[in-house]
Image (cartoon, rainbow, N blue to C red):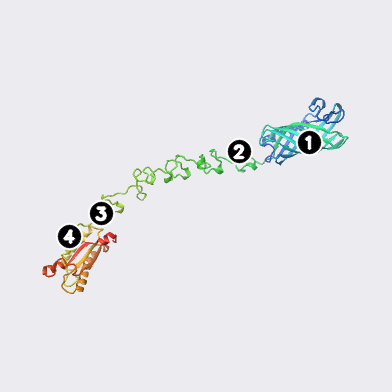
Amino acid sequence: MKHLNKVLIVLVFMLGFSSTQAQDENNPWALGLGVNAVDFYPTGEDAPLGGYFSEYFNMGDHWNILPGISRLSLARYIGAGFHFELAGSANQIDQFGDEGIDDYMYYGLDGTFNYSFRAEQGWFDPVVGVGGGYTWLDDGGTPTLNGTVGLNFWVTDNLALTLQSMYKHSFDDDFNSHFQHWAGIKLAFGGTDTDGDGVYDKDDECPEVPGLPEFNGCPDSDGDGIPDHLDACPDQPGLPEFDGCPDTDGDGIPDPQDECPTEAGPASTNGCPDADGDGVIDSEDECPNEPGPAENNGCPWEDTDGDGVLDKDDDCPEVAGPASNNGCPEPTVEVVQELNEYSNTVLFDINKATIKPESEEALDAIVEIMNEYSNTIFHIEGHTDSTGADDYNMDLSKRRAAAVRDYLVEHGIPANRLTSEGYGETRPIATNQTREGREQNRRVEISLDQERQMSGDN
């Protein structure tokens, strides 16, 4: 018996350190170890026995106690506070009520359905139960109907001190009903904790990863109070408002969404600073303290010639000119007069559109002047006097204007900057009644093509 006691004590400690919960759906098994006492006196029968419950606590006169561990039980949790317990006990009877008797060996095997009133995780655990069993006394035995009440005091999550009293009603008239009491310990065990974190799989939201009870068994690797499975940045301590991600620069933009996580900046530039507020972040802004468009790398557009037309829109960025001519200078009245002084000296063969060689010097001077106004469209006009038929004069004037245009194109003036037209005798500048007047009317004039200039058709 002494060796048995030692083995059971070792088993108690092993179970005590391997389990962490009271008997419930997580730890469905419970082992009970203790000392039992058998009392025949308060069973309501004739002498030498007393009335029911009389001298119920008279341990010295009526209780039969076998020193050492004399009761062993195993219980299985069923659910909703119910569990079934199977218990075996042994004793030595030397008190039968008020009479002493020879030592009889007593053995009991009992099965009981018990109900626990224990509140969730509470330490105070009242129990009631009903069941049946079989009791042997010396050479005889009888079945019994059992009713029990008891108390469990859970001193740790898996270890309880237990007190229990059971009434065993005998179905054999020759075998007395009696009370059996016992005191001992109860150990809950049998739960599955795959990851060994102290939270059983049934309640563990992360059963294969060690975690913390406050997070239902899930880990919090960065210790920021947000479990990993809800943490968008599980390896970096962060803030709840950013799903566990940090905001290193404190600009209200979490680091994963912040293109400049160590420098505070507005949301409009994805968390990067923009000192001049032009929408170009400082690291990409060639002029970080002057607002400028992104297409100019954050710098303001220049106006080199100061004509009010920005260089990006100025076809002549180094020479001032009006916006109407895309920033390029326009010929003045004096320049147009100079062009016409040269054009009036252009000579043609009689009744032909062939330019005489001596006119080339004047035409080359016209090319030089036109090159100074690279954005201007010029119009070349051909005119005749009234001598000859109208149709002939109109055709001749057209061909002569076209001949001048062709010469200018051949000598470097872009064709899209020149137009030509013949007007025959319809636009005289002097009388056709005199020789001098007719000479003045036979002419080539150069003007600005205002219509194409305004439409931008160049």
Instruction: Pick whichever of labels 2 and 4 is earlier in the sequence.
Output: 2
Instruction: Pick whichever of labels 1 and 2 is earlier in the sequence.
Output: 1
CA distance separating discs 1 and 2: 38 Å
Question: Which mark is in front, 4 or 1?
Answer: 1
On screen, residue 426 versus residue 46, left or right, reads: left
Residue that badge 3 annotates:
322
Question: Which mark is in front, 3 or 2?
Answer: 3
Q: For the residue marked with disc 3, what is the amino acid?
A: Pro
Q: Which mark is residue 337?
A: 4
Identify the secondary structure beneath mark 2: helix
Place of residue 214 in the rendered image (x, y in percent of width and height, measured from the top left): 59, 38
Number of callouts: 4
Say if residue 62 shows up in the picture: yes
Q: For the residue marked with disc 4, what is the amino acid?
A: Gln
Q: Is residue 321 above or below residue 32?
A: below
CA distance separating discs 3 and 1: 114 Å
Identify the secondary structure beneath mark 4: helix
Instruction: Pick whichever of labels 3 and 1 is earlier in the sequence.
Output: 1
Q: Residues within 10 Å of mark 4 (few under 14, many from 20)?
A: some
Q: Quadrant of residue 423?
A: bottom left
Q: Which mark is residue 163?
A: none
